[in-house]
C-alpha cells in the first residue's frame, strides 16, 4: 500500500491484529478504509475485510470489548453471504490481485464451503491449490493439502490421498516448514498455529497488500 496515502500504517496494524487473532479490532480498522476509496480500489483489502469481519462475528466479542468496539459485525455471521462476496471479488478483482492473493482467497472460499458442507466445491478448490503448490508459500500449500486429505478421507476417497500425503511427508516440505530442526523440536519451540502462518510469519488467510 502506497505510504503516501496515509493508510499504510493502519493496514500494517490491521494485519498485526489479525495475526494475533484479534479479528474484531482488525475488522474495525479495515472498515474505516471503506469510508475512502482505498478499500474499493484494492481487492486484497476487501478480501481481508471480509475474512476479518466473518471471523470476528463467528467468535463474538469478549465482554470487555463489546462496549469499546465500534464494530457493526453481525453476531450471527452468514457463511453463504461471505462465500458470495468472495466469489464476486474473485471475478471482479482477478486482474488486480497477485496469484498468491487469489490463492489465499480461494483457500478461504474452500474453508467456507467445507463449513456449509459443500464438499464437492471445496474439494475442487483445494485440489486446484494442491496442483499449484509449487507456486504457493509452503504454509498455504500445506494447509490446503491437510484440508484436502481430511476431506478425501471423510468421503472415503482414499485413492486420491496418496500424492498429497507423499507431499506432506516429503523431507523437502518438512524442511521448508521447520528448517533443519526436527518436527518435534520445532513444535516444542513454536506455539503458534503452523497451518495458518506462512514462513514470513503472516497468517495464510491474509492477502498480501501490494506496496
Image (tube, rainbow, N blue to C red):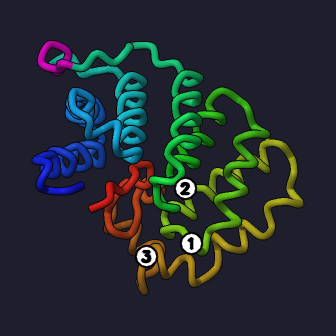
Element on which disc 3 rests:
helix
Residue 104: image x %, image y %? 50, 52
Horizontally, residue 115 falls left or right of residue 155, namely: left
Residue at 33%, 18% in the rendered image: 73
Residue 109: image x %, image y %? 58, 40
Q: Does residue 111 sit above or below 162 in this rendering?
A: above
Question: Quadrant location of residue 169?
Answer: bottom right
Residue ID for mark 3: 178
Q: Which residues are magenta?
A: 65-70
**Which quadrant would the N terminus be assigned to in this image?**
bottom left
Element on which disc 2 rests:
helix
Residue at 37%, 41% in the rendered image: 48
The verdict on residue 206 being magenta is no
Q: Does residue 93 sit above or below 80 in this rendering?
A: below
Q: Does residue 81 sit above or below 39 in this rendering?
A: above
Q: Nearer the viewer, mark 3 or mark 2?
A: 2
Of helix, strand and loop, which mostly describes the magenta segment? Answer: loop
Residue ID for mark 2: 103
Horizontally, residue 147 falls left or right of residue 162, namely: left
Residue 79: image x %, image y %? 55, 24
Q: Does residue 102 sit above or below 176 in this rendering?
A: above
Residue 126: image x %, image y %? 67, 52
Residue at 10%, 47% in the rendered image: 6
C-alpha distance separating marks 3 and 2: 22 Å
Question: Quadrant location of residue 66?
Answer: top left
Mark carried by residue 135: 1
Q: Contact, CB < 8 Å: mark 3 with mark 1?
A: no
The verdict on residue 66 being magenta is yes
Q: Contact, CB < 8 Å: mark 2 with mark 1?
A: yes
Nearer to me, 94 or 20: 94
Nearer to me, 174 or 56: 56
Question: Quadrant location of residue 198?
Answer: bottom left
Amino acid at each position: 500500500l502506497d505510504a503516501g496515502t496515509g493508510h499504510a500504517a493502519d493496514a500494517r496494524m490491521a494485519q498485526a491484529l489479525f495475526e494475533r487473532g484479534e479479528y474484531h479490532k482488525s475488522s474495525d480498522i479495515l472498515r474505516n478504509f471503506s469510508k475512502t476509496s482505498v478499500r474499493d480500489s484494492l481487492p486484497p483489502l476487501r478480501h481481508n475485510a471480509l475474512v476479518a469481519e466473518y471471523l470476528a462475528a463467528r467468535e463474538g466479542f469478549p465482554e470487555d470489548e463489546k462496549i469499546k468496539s465500534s464494530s457493526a459485525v453481525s453476531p450471527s455471521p452468514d457463511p453463504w453471504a461471505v462465500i458470495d462476496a468472495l466469489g464476486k471479488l474473485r471475478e471482479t478483482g482477478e486482474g488486480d490481485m497477485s496469484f498468491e492473493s487469489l490463492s489465499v482467497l480461494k483457500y478461504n472460499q474452500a474453508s467456507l464451503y467445507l463449513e456449509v458442507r459443500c464438499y464437492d466445491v471445496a474439494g475442487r478448490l483445494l485440489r486446484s491449490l494442491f496442483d499449484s503448490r509449487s507456486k504457493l508459500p509452503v504454509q498455504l500449500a500445506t494447509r490446503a493439502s491437510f484440508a484436502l486429505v481430511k476431506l478425501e478421507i471423510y468421503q472415503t476417497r482414499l485413492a486420491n490421498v496418496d500424492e498429497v500425503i507423499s507431499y506432506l511427508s516429503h523431507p523437502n516440505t518438512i524442511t521448508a516448514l521447520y528448517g533443519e530442526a526436527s518436527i518435534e523440536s520445532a513444535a516444542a519451540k513454536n506455539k503458534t498455529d503452523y497451518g495458518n502462518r506462512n514462513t514470513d510469519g503472516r497468517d495464510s488467510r491474509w492477502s498480501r497488500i501490494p506496496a
